[in-house]
Image (cartoon, rainbow, N blue to C red):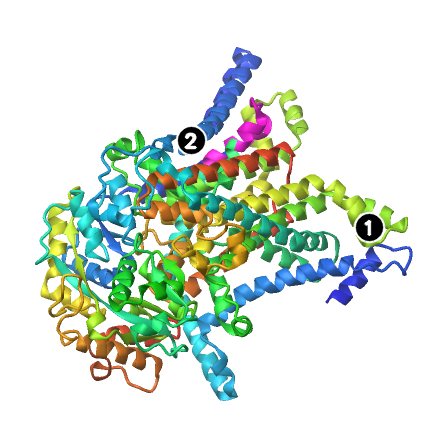
Amino acid sequence: MNSSNDNTAIGVHNGRATGMRSRAVIFTAIFYFITVMLMLAVCWLFLSNVDQLFPREDTVRTEAMDAWRSDEPTKEFAGGCWRFPSFWRSVNLTVVSATVTTLIAAILGIPAAYALSRYKIPGRAVIDVLFSSVIVLPASSVGLCLVVMFQYGPLHDILDGWGIHVPLSVPGIVVVQLVLSLAMGMSAWRAAFDGVKPRFEHVARSLGASPWRSFRTVTLPSARAGIFAGLILAWTRAAAEFGGVLTFCSTFEQFSPELFSPIIRALHLHKADPLAVNMWAQIEYGNVEYGFAIGFVLVMISALSVYVLHKIGGKGYIW
Amino acid sequence: MSESARQTVSTRATPPKRGTRSVWPVICLIAVLLILSAYLLLVVSNVVYLTGIDEASFSSVAQLLKDLRRGIHDILWFFTSGRMSSRFWLTVKTASISTMLSLLVGIPAGYALSRFRFPWPNLTRTLIDLPVMVPPAAVGVFLFGVMHGWPVKPLCEMIGISFAHNTNGVILVQFVVTVSFCARLMKSSFDGVNPHFEQVSRSLGASLPRTFWKLTLPLAKRGIIASTIVVWARAAAEWEALMLFVGGTEAETDVMPFAVYLDWNGGMMGWVASYSIACILLAVASMAAVRIIAGKSYLW
Amino acid sequence: MLRALSCFLATALMLAATGCGDSGNVMLFHAGVGQRSSLNEIKDVFLARHPNARLNFAYKGSGYFIADLERSREGDLFMPGEEFYFLQAVERGFITDYDPKTDIAAHFMVVIATPRGNPKNIQELEDFAKPGIRVGLGNPKACAIGIWDEKTFRKAGIWEQVKKNQVQSAKCIAETASAIQHREVDASLIWSSTAVLYLRDIEIIPIEPRYRGLVRLPVGVLKFSKHPELARQLKEFMLSEEGSKIFRSHAYVTDPGPLDEQGFCLDGGMASRDDCKWLVQAAKVCKDENIPVNAETCGHLVGEVRRQRATKRAGTR
């Protein structure tokens, strides 16, 4: 505080403009520096790990290990992941499950976000807070909550009566992903609808349009960018889900194919894990190069979706 | 509830014809109800699980009362024991430190992103947002590679700081996961301040730093505080990267989200459920604070 | 504003500094997640005697350690859930002084676990092969129980049928056990020392002696240990009489009797008979509030039973 006042005094004597300008330059430079450093750190975080894709000389493969892993990735670039059908099925599973999740999230979330944005619902503030708090819920906690919800109490009895087991099943993945991606999508859609003035709708309504028609023809087109942003966010979040899937669904790669239902086999979703889970699993099995390759695929997927998000100028998100 | 809400809708939207009833508002409200009930079921089942009340409890009133008393006793036991408070304060401590560190980088970076020009704006913005959108698990894995590679490892060994399996690692992970998120939120906070004011301040003779301290920061205060809370909540909820980078150590790295997983693996479901409830309460409390400060529960 | 911010900065740096300080005598112990409860007790006792030392654990599925050690080359002690993983570390030269005769801290016993009440009436190993039973198996690449699943069912000659019933491929023993606890699967094989953590929610069924596996648990000091002397002392403590006692109180088997080279019982289950009996008894006592908890009703597992009886959902003492 003091030093800054002194500087001002000196600045006044020596010519106010030059002092001010130099301070502005230093200020700007520091801020630029911090930002550029942050960007470089992000680049470093992802790019410095490229060397992990190459097998190391000093990794010894023991005989016992090789006996177990005759059908396993070998020590080559990226573990030779592209040669494994399970890798492509995992990509497929990630894309399909995230898409299904996003669809369900959109069907549920867009009307809900619209209602929260437009209608006077009693306790709307509380509902708002509840929905947005899902975003800052730990994934481990989500996993636990889901297990408890599906395995205890009335829901378990009902589902058990129908012979449905949600945990440890492929559709379970969608259930887990839905929790977080719905919350993400909702926050974006909420913001999108809040950004559209209700006045236009009133005009449309007063001209005789039904609520649905006014929503479809007036609100939806005006909020288009925000809705797309929400879809992208929901999709990316769903594709990034890891902890919940791990605790709720476990892994499927080691199963024999006949354990999966015909629909899942027809879609080539069997014997595969969502990419984030597969990344962890592969590193855990010792296929470090393979795991990092999947990590890079995940980074590329996220980078692409963020880029698209900025391209369409989508706003209204927290994440 | 839907009936009363429909009435409020119809009074508010001043419909011209009573005849053009639409199912659309009803669908919207049903969607809200569905999500709300799923969410409440998610949370409530957790609490019910902790109390241990099940089908057998409903056999008689006496049994139910007995189980209820026992459940309340259990909840009190878990929430008043030292293990809970030590994990809670560990979480608060690490999240606060990492949030402060994030703010140190995030506020300048956010201001720069909001006001200064960068080449390839979409690309730079994507870069800043990338750690936010990449799965935290991948961040943990990549962090492992960075911390065990040149030049970080020799540097850490020289200084004598270790980041694996201790609290430092937790802070590092939380910092990495939240720093660009923080910058992003701060950018939005500063975007909310009209640059016109700054121009006026500058033209009246205030230097750029002075304008920033005296004008921009106070004007963006609300947004900054709200963002700080969100960043804090996000840091306190980090688990996936922790699991892959830091590893579990009793009373050292097991912040609450991680303790959920660790105790889950130790079969201590009582702790798991109570930590999980504590996490939910933290999340709800921080989002409520955001809503009170920022006026809405999402930020931008 | 500036003052507030500088105060804030100072606090942040101070807090960060307090976090960074002590990295003196910190040992790092890589241990399978299944050994957690017993090792925490070992740690408490050991640290009470070595007040200067500090001990951190890295609990994971056993398979992960090789990948972790290979890349990080950090850590002082290593105790995976199976000799197989240990031998890999030996083969890679991470552990140089392994003596298979003396370095075994304790044994796991493989038992059958089913959800509370045993709804599918699983009584013996062959029941795993019945159609419609949801079986949880471990993944041999990630955890030790996976190896034993395959070994045990192959010995019983029903591996192919059991594979058809698989609904879970777990990556650590705890995942298998919690799936049982939450009724996600109908039956699994788990360690005795893991089963003892879930007394309230599972039923424990001993395997018939000829298929009963006893798993050797070696412990070793890693080559790149920064505190080899302290690590050696800890290892010795774990191998001592006192260490065995702690392991035993967590349902490890310390006297397995004669085993074949694969690790299966040779003496018709004589040596491990008591361990089986007390395990089953402990599960019974823990569920029934009317039975008193003492050494007569639950034997050496009285501590575990007492802990889990204290609250409806298990916590710590």
Q: Position of residue B51 (x, y in %)?
A: 45, 73
- The kind of secondary structure element at disc 1 is helix
Dot 2: chain letter: A
Q: CA distance from mark 1 to mark 2?
A: 49 Å
Q: Nearer the viewer, mark 1 or mark 2?
A: 1
As drawn, C255 above or below C79: below
Residue kind at label 2, given as amino acid type:
Ala
| Front in this rendered view, residue C86 or C169 | C169
- The kind of secondary structure element at disc 2 is helix
Q: Position of residue A285 (x, y in %)?
A: 32, 48
Residue at numbered disc 2: A41
- For the magenta stretch, what is the residue range? B104-126
Q: Position of residue C305 (x, y in %)?
A: 28, 76
As drawn, A12 above or below B19: above
| Quarter of the figure that contains the C terminus of chain B | top right
Residue at numbered disc 1: A213
Q: Residue at x 41, y 71 (%)?
A: C131
So how many labels did they put on this image?
2
